[in-house]
Amino acid sequence: MRLALLTNQIPPYRVATFAALRRKVDQLTVILSENRVAPGLENADIDIRVARSLRIPSVRRHESGYFERYETHVPVGIVPALRRAAPQCVFAAELGMRTAGAVLYRLGSRTPLVVHADLSEHTERGRGSVRPALRRLLLAQIDGVMVNGRSGADYIRGLGFPGRAISMLPYATDVERFGTVQRLPGERGELRLLYVGRLIELKGLEPWIAALARALRQRPDRRVRLTVAGDGDRREAIERLELPPNLRLQLLGQTRYSELPRVYADADVLVMPSLGDTWGLVVNEAMASGLPVIGSSQTQAVVELIRDGVEGWIFSAAAPATIDEAIGRLLDAAPEKLAVMGADARRAALVLSPDHVASALLAACRKARNAKLRGTAE
């Protein structure tokens, strides 16, 4: 199959998936909205092109109270780029302007179009009536939709798209990079917690640290080190938080992707307190590294990959009582329990390999293409 994939950029954590996908198709053309490609695909024989795009910065306040800052990319060169590639299937990695360009190409070429809707019911709340209306128009011209999890599927079905044309496409981590991590010994009696990600309001780290501090004041004999790998506009506020003496905060700052295996190796549990994430790839990375996860139900990766009490602990970022309860269970867990949970987490995460995700993507494209061929024959 000749496949054209439309996306924004190729970050480091997607390199292995793109390489796996290339091995499964005859030709892979990747059309980017911006010229940003992480190292690792130099010898993968992928035709990488950049379509001229307009970038529109936006800010919105989610109904849950946090601000979202993002950019809308309006690619104006999608149709000419697709004409040059002449694919047998088009895969668009979003449900917006990039997909609109692919729809224009599809109307003239009749090429099957599959879209990855990177969203959830929670992240799409409070966006008004115009956005869903425009998406219904797009979905009427789309042959298949892939979603991260059940919440995304429910949202797409709610727009009137048939369930039979919806399939799952969770994010994958580089299991060869993280799946062989050897844990580093910590200080005796100290629980090592880890947060990896941007330090922004959306990630919910400040209120979670405050809840952890409250719990540790009630457990003066319990010692915890919280390592934070990442940077953002909330760093200074996090540094100013009042912490009990038995909670040690370690700020690593911006951390390169290549350094993350070592960071996970020096931890016992990952913290993922996001107020709203369409997935949350650090959950995959941590679990593949053998770490249980304490995370919010507003993070789709947490809901899809973790069974409460087995691979980690789940709470609602909107319900402080559940945060306190989950933190209490974490702090009361014996080291032996954490080890068992970490082993369960690793087994669950290793299933979502780049090869697995590439196969799922290709299966959706083949299904859409076969349905298109049957429709043409009829």
Image: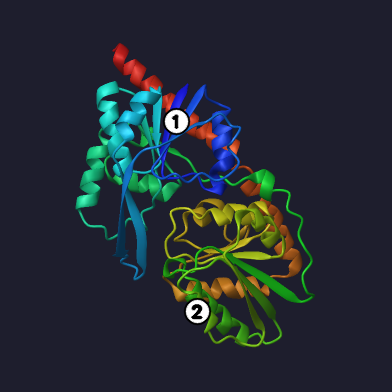
Rendering coords of residue 133 (x, y %)? 21, 46
Asked if residue 63 is positioned above or below residue 99 in the image, the reply reads below
Asked if residue 327 is positioned above or below residue 162 in the image, the reply reads below
Q: Residue at x 44, y 61 (%)?
A: 298
Q: Residue 195 lies in what quarter of the image?
A: bottom right
Q: Which residue is mark 2?
A: 236
Rendering coords of residue 309 (x, y %)? 61, 62
Rendering colour mode: rainbow
Residue closer to the observer: 97 or 290: 97
Residue closer to the observer: 83 or 167: 83
**Mark 2 and 1 residues: CB-CB less than 8 Å, in contact?**
no
Q: Name the quarter where the C terminus is drawn.
A: top left
**Of the residues shown, which amino acid type is indicated by label 2?**
Glu
**Of the residues shown, which amino acid type is indicated by label 1?**
Ala
Instruction: Provide the secondary structure element on which disc 1 rests.
Output: helix
Left or right of residue 378, residue 251 in this image? right
Q: Which residue is mark 1?
A: 364
Q: Residue at x 69, y 81 (%)?
A: 222
The tag earlier along the polypeptide, 2 or 1, is 2
Q: Residue 377 lies in what quarter of the image?
A: top left
